Amino acid sequence: MVISILFELLMLGAYVWQGLSQGEWDAQLVWLGHACALVCLVVWALLGMRRIQVDGEALTARTALGTRRKTTFAQIDRAETDYQMMSLTLFVEGAAFAKVGLWHTCIANLLERLADEGIDVSEAAKGPMTKGKLCWAAMRPVVMAFLGIDVAASSILAFMCVFAGADPSILALVPFLFLLVGIILPTLLLSMPLRGIWVLGRQERKLGFSFSSEMEARGATGTSFEDGDWFVGLGNTRIVAFRRDYIDRISSVEGSDSGDRCLLVSKDGKRHKVYASKEVLEDLRRWFRKGPRGVTGEAPRA
């Protein structure tokens, strides 16, 4: 929303500088700015309306369309967290009852209440952890965001044709947008999680193990795991997966133009620049120095 408004102000400033003379392309840019702002306002409003209200034993879920559904804690079967999509889903009688974002202020209180009620809270990802699942989990938010941009941009172009009298030939940009934003850009960004997969493969070759077999033997699911031998985490579309007997030392976390990173040196002298979110890198350093954390459950993690 802010970006769209700044875009409009920038365009208007350019028009004032030119003496308020607008050509056909200038008018289309103005309508593009208006459409961007409108789409962002609608998305913001819909996301802001989706919430859960707790009153004693009763829960009231309000959807993005404003409708309300009610249930009680006794009727909730289970809950699932998805830390890549930052969402919590509640299930009633096997069906999804409501989904809310993990960024909400009181989400930790809700998770603690679910734990007090004895309701199982698990990760949405099922089955043993594999390199393919980690790679998809790291890329899924990016792919979903790019697809959303494609849909929004296509809607804006259609809006300009219908209401602004723009040349219908601009709709020829829609396939190009889906090719560029929906396929080419995610493919280029795939190099970010693949870097972690390459480091993981090097550990397999050096230490002689299979990552999938190791995770299956330990019952590891989802997108994060810690025990005495392994640390696995995702952050900023990066995969951080290391076995303890591969690591010699880890430097402190520092910022860079490519994001937060730390320097990890293996026992054979290989130096790895590990990129991820600062929280994941600090957890990696803490795990290597002190061992796996003693806190379990989803509420402390959220």
Image (cartoon, helix red, strand yellow):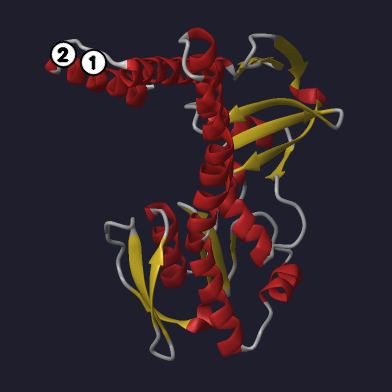
Mark 2: amino acid: Val
The quadrant in which residue 206 appears is bottom right
The residue tagged 2 is 16
* Foreground pick, 292 / 160: 160
Q: Which residue is mark 1?
A: 12
Kindly identify the residue that appears in the image at 43 percent across and 21 percent down.
36
The secondary element bearing badge 1 is classed as helix
- Say if 86 sits above or below 47 in the image: below
Q: CA gap, disc 1 to disc 2?
A: 6 Å
Q: Where residue 106 sits in the image (x, y, percent)?
A: 51, 26
Mark 1: few/some/many CA within 10 Å (<14, 14-19, 20+): some
The answer to whether residue 84 is visible is no
**Contact check, label 1 and label 2, Cβ < 8 Å:** yes
Residue in the picture at 37% in, 79% down: 249
Residue at 52 percent across and 83 percent down: it is 245
Identify the image quadrant of the N terminus: top left
Which amino acid lies under the numbered mark 1 shown in the image of this protein?
Answer: Leu
Residue 213, position as x, y percentages in the image: 74, 75
